[in-house]
Amino acid sequence: MSMRSTLETLERVNSKYLMFHAKTSDTDPGDARFLFSAKDNLTSKDMETCAGSRILEGYFPPFDATVIARMREAGGKLIGKTNMDEFGFGTFSTNSGLEVPRNPFDLERACGGSSGGSACAAAVFEDHPSLGVSTGGSICCPASFCGVYGIAPTYGRVSRYGLIDYGNSLDKIGVLSSKAGDLRRYINIIAGRDEKDPTSCVQPELKDERTPVRSVAVPKEGVEGLSKNVEAAFTNALDELRRMGIEVETVDMPSLKYAMPAYYVLATSEASTNLARYVGMRYGRQDGDLSLKFDDYFSDVRSRYFGDEAKRRILLGTFTRMVGYSDRYYSKARQVREVVIDDYKRVLRDHDAVLAPTMPFTAPRFDDISKMSALDSYKADYLTVPANLAGVPHLNVPCGYDGDGMPIGMQFVADHWNENALFTMAEDWEKEFDLRRPEVSA
Ligand code: GLN
């Protein structure tokens, strides 16, 4: 499909899949070299930016996030800001205060989260890189549910300037696309130190070269609790890797079991402080009753416009940092984080990548999600969270389909700064794997 026809059908396609919160109305690609979209927690000058939250409705940032600026400088035209869980708080994009994106393989199912709209756009549009953000698996999870490739690079590889923070020590910006080669191409565009973000590091150069993966480690803890379909597809994928000449070895990574609880302590601790800035005075909604005392004014705006999950995380994160509790929860979680990093370092000394399924099941139906408790949904992240906690790069590749035709994905994890191994693996895998695109109609 040409860029022009993508732009001309944007409105109709979006009304079916709801991938975009804000989108361009311009149907002329001009001299753009490619079209792209970006998660709605990345600030953009020309489009409303809400991070999936009603509290930010009406916020038009005065600046572009560094990643958006770099994509535009490379000739990209931003076509839309993608729907997501509010501030990134979720696994299915159903915690959005705005629109909930639909899975392009089955409209009754979720896209995954929290970068659900980005995965949806990457699956629906041809040759379409979409920028996503991962704090605890939010690129690989939706990439897996929507059957596309997606990478969350090493923490510090890409500038976070202009990202609406969820958990500052965890957040990383990456790329989703139905083409493996796009991950290398666009990470190269957005990566690199940025003076505006002190956590974007002086970093080993991302050379455009092949780094073949020769051996992968499959942690025992990463193949527990899987649905039958995911287990079968993953077993087939391991056979395929062996046929490709890659050594596959089962290993123990006991720390993986503790990563999920530690992640939710750290992520909510950071989130609760980040949300303190939304008081109905600086960004977005400012329609409270000004005759109220200031704390009543804040409480009123926050009560009305934060969703339930944001409120839950403010409470959880405040509790885990409180005097008397922080040693038990926050400090403990930081120790677990160190142990998880050590575990990856140990295994990655002898192997080029760690591999496990990305999600334990395929994209669930919206009516099943509505029956899940918050804890059920946190638990679904046990495979994606550990790599995010360790700051190591991780990449989803589609590896099969279940009986209903829903995509299944697996996640490769490499050592810090070794994205090249992941890019090479995905490019080699793509040659062997029969990727299905959803049937798109508007
Ligand atoms: N599902 C995880 C959470 O709710 C991950 C979210 C993310 O990476 N933004 O925190």
Image (cartoon, rainbow, N blue to C red):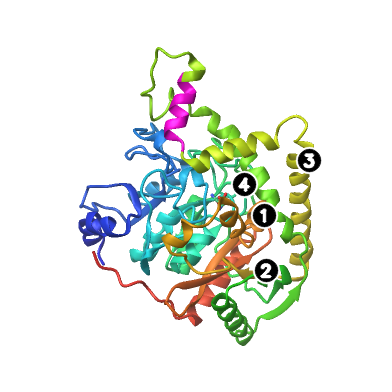
- In this figure, which residue is indicated by the disc labeled 3? 328
| Comes first in the chain, label 4 or label 3 | 4
| Comes first in the chain, label 2 or label 4 | 4
Crowding near the residue tagged with mark 3, few <14, some 14–19, many ≥20 C-alpha atoms within 10 Å: few
Q: Comparing marks 2 and 4, which lies closer to the viewer?
A: 2
Residue 386 in the image, given as x and y percentages of width and height: 67, 57
User: Any magenta on residue 300?
Assistant: yes
User: Is the residue at mark 4 in contact range of ligand 1, meaning its CB lies under 8 Å from it?
Assistant: yes
Residue 167, numbered circle: none
Considering every residue shown, the one lying at the far front of the view is 371
Q: Which residue sits at x=64%, y=60%?
A: 382
| CA gap, disc 4 and disc 1 | 13 Å
Of the pair 390 and 335, the residue shown nearer to us: 335
Dot 3 lies on which element?
helix
| Comes first in the chain, label 4 or label 1 | 4
| Comes first in the chain, label 1 or label 3 | 1
- In this figure, which residue is indicated by the disc labeled 1? 260
Name the dominant secondary structure of the magenta segment: helix
- In this figure, which residue is indicated by the disc labeled 2? 222
Q: In the picture, residue 270 is in which quadrant?
A: top right
Crowding near the residue tagged with mark 2, few <14, some 14–19, many ≥20 C-alpha atoms within 10 Å: many
Crowding near the residue tagged with mark 1, few <14, some 14–19, many ≥20 C-alpha atoms within 10 Å: many
Q: In the picture, residue 284 is in which quadrant?
A: top left
Task: Say which amino acid is labelled 1.
Answer: Met
Does residue 78 appear to the left or right of 309 in the view shown? left
Q: Which residue sits at x=74%, y=65%?
A: 348
